[in-house]
Image: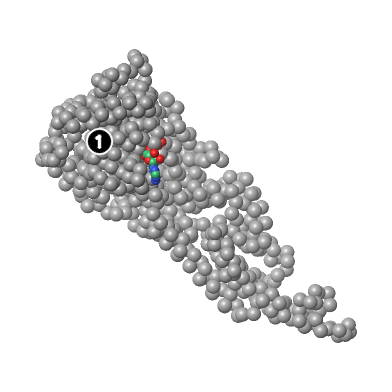
């Protein structure tokens, strides 16, 4: 159930971020209060996303502090923060309902009753007005599904499921038409005021109506603070330095154009902002900020979203903080639950691809051709597309602490098996019968080895192609050949390519029939070792490569900037 969050103040003070020698954020101070919508405006590349990354804890600062109710914003409190990134990353074959259900199962506590989880989903769906597309698939560039605006709301819905106190939105309106963007921001503003949530959103080019919805705004220019304060006072700030917005002109457009204009104008804005910040009685301090010493705190909430002024004393803040500091577990659900849900989703995604008829045809053809040559698993446009698409989803979900990497990895490996095996099984069966490679016992002896080879092939990434010299294919091939040819009858030298077999080379008398033994065929193919020798390395490959894959995922750090 949505709960009304306690009054809170999140403050970033003197934030500085440098990448190599480039200063990306320089002395940014901003305060976000519960119940309010704070917008971070700025030209492209000014540092808006970087600031959100810093606040969410995904990026370290070179200088500055972030506090929550006057205390350092710690890891535990950050779990009450949700971050909706600019790109919507989803499993495309799942419906909106399935996506929300999956997220709820993983991110809501296991102790919460199933019925309650469903109620939470229903509630969010209503808050964001998404009922009409609940059973539409997410879709991708190949198959249409949710619209851009619906996808954006779906991203937000996934984050709202955990009922966070603080919601960071990175460019939620980018790519949306003006009316969809307006509806979304109206929903966000209403959500913030109804449930006393803190919402901080970066935004590129808000319409006039959207602009008037912001309680406070921070203007970032080249990583520096251009204006911070109530949105409705922003034009007054510019007027004080001689910059006037024409009547009926969109204030956001005016502000952004001014922020991108000549150096002299930009310097004027930055100097005025610096001057105001230095004033002890600046608007900034009066309205929003905890004083420098972080001890005294007095908020006058003067916006229309609140019916009454809210005054929070130090005592209140300390009490609220204790509540917010309640120890929370690292994971909402057990390893097994994560494994089960991740397998479920992986199945849905894979079989969703199969439901698309053309995917089956294409997969079959490619598998037939490639599989016939190499017994390799198919690697066509669809699977590549899906695999490429998964990385950002996993990165997003892992960053939000949705599940353990080990649960994901094992679920992915196991849930893919039925599909991975289905087409090679079909092919092997057909070939086995058509080529008359043996009877039922031979089939059941050789079939597991084929499956083994499918697994080995899957685990070798293209950049490790040179490992063919380690002959992953040779081992199962060797064992299959041995099992098949062991039961073959000898055949005469005449009628065959005699140079292949030593026994045939010396046959000079046409009346003498010399036979090639099955063992001769194997020797000629370089298969000379016992069956076990060929099977064992396949297991080593399967376990070895999967372990390496897991370790790479585990220890490779994702760069955010
Ligand atoms: N890893 C990096 N190395 C060097 N510069 C970087 C790196 N990451 C970001 N930057 C630079 O930092 C600046 C701020 O980037 P950021 O993504 O925060 O901007 P933004 O205001 O969110 O832009 P947009 O509105 O286009 O999303 C940009 O100039 C960007 O090129």
Q: Which residue of the protein is positioned furthest toward the front in this rendering?
A: 264
Using residue 497 as the reference point, say whether residue 534 is left or right of it. Answer: left
Crowding near pointer 1: few (<14 within 10 Å), some, many (20+)?
A: many
**Foreground residue among 221 and 415:** 221
Q: Quadrant of ligand 1?
A: top left
Task: Tell me if I can see residue 499 in this picture.
Answer: yes
Q: Position of residue 286 (x, y in %)?
A: 16, 29
User: Nearest the camera: 293 or 191?
Assistant: 293
Q: Seen in the image, is 228 located left or right of residue 354? A: left
Query: Is 430 placed left or right of 256 in the picture?
Result: right
- For the C terminus, the image quarter is top left
Q: How is the image coloured?
A: one colour
Label 1 secondary element = strand
Classify residue 524 by image quadrant.
bottom right
The residue shown at (31%, 54%) is 331
Question: Measured from the top left, where is residue 513 in percent x and y?
Answer: 84, 83
Q: Position of residue 7 (x, y in %)?
A: 20, 37
Instruction: Please give the name of the residue rendered at 14% of the width and 33% of the height, measured from the top-left corner.
Output: 298
In depth, the one of 63 and 549 nearer the eye is: 63
Residue matched to label 1? 30
Q: Can you say which quadrant of the picture contains the N terminus?
A: top left
């Amino acid at each position: 159930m949505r709960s009304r969050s306690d009054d809170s103040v999140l403050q970033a003070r003197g934030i500085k971020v440098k990448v190599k020698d480039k200063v990306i954020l320089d002395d940014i101070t901003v305060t976000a209060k519960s119940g309010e919508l704070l917008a971070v405006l700025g030209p492209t590349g000014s540092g808006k996303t970087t600031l959100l990354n810093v606040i969410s804890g995904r990026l370290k600062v070179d200088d500055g502090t972030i506090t929550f109710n006057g205390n350092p914003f710690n890891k535990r409190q950050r779990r009450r923060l949700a971050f909706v990134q600019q790109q919507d990353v989803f499993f495309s074959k799942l419906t909106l309902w399935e996506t929300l259900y999956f997220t709820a199962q993983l991110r809501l506590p296991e102790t919460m009753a199933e019925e309650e989880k469903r109620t939470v989903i229903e509630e969010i769906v209503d808050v964001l007005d998404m009922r009409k597309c609940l059973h539409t698939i997410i879709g991708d560039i190949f198959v249409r599904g949710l619209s851009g605006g619906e996808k954006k709301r779906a991203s937000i819905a996934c984050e709202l499921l955990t009922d966070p106190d603080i919601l960071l939105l990175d460019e939620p309106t980018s790519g949306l038409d003006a009316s969809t963007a307006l509806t979304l921001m109206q929903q966000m503003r209403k959500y913030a005021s109804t449930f006393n949530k803190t919402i901080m959103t970066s935004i590129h080019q808000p319409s006039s109506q959207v602009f008037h919805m912001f309680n406070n705004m921070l203007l970032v220019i080249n990583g520096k603070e251009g204006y911070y304060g109530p949105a409705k006072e922003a034009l007054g700030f510019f007027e004080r330095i001689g910059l006037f917005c024409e009547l009926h002109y969109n204030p956001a457009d005016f502000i952004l154009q001014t922020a991108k204009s000549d150096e002299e104008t930009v310097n004027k804005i930055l100097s005025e902002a610096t001057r105001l910040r230095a004033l002890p009685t600046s608007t900034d301090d009066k309205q929003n900020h905890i004083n420098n010493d972080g001890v005294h705190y007095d908020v006058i909430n003067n916006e229309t979203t609140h019916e009454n002024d809210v005054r929070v004393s130090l005592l209140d803040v300390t009490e609220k903080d204790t509540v917010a500091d309640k120890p929370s577990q690292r994971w909402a659900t057990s390893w097994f639950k994560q494994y089960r849900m991740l397998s479920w989703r992986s199945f849905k995604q894979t079989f969703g691809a199969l439901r698309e008829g053309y995917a089956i045809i294409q997969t079959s053809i490619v598998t037939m051709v490639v599989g016939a040559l190499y017994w390799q698993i198919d690697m066509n446009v669809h699977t590549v597309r899906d695999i490429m698409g998964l990385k950002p989803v996993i990165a997003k979900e892992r960053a939000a602490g949705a599940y353990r990497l080990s649960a994901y990895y094992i679920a992915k490996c196991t849930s893919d098996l039925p599909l991975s095996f289905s087409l090679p099984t079909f092919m092997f069966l057909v070939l086995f019968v058509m080529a008359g490679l043996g009877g039922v016992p031979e089939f059941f002896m050789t079939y597991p080895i084929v499956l083994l080879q499918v697994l080995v092939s899957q685990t070798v990434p293209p950049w490790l192609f040179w490992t063919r010299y380690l002959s992953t294919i040779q081992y199962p091939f060797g064992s299959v050949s041995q099992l098949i040819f062991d039961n073959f009858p000898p055949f005469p030298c005449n009628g065959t390519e005699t140079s292949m077999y030593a026994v045939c080379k010396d046959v000079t008398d046409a009346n003498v029939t010399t036979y090639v033994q099955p063992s001769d065929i194997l020797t000629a193919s370089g298969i000379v070792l016992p069956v076990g020798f060929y099977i064992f390395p396949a297991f080593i490959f399967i376990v070895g490569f999967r372990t390496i894959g897991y370790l790479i995922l585990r220890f490779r750090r994702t760069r955010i900037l």
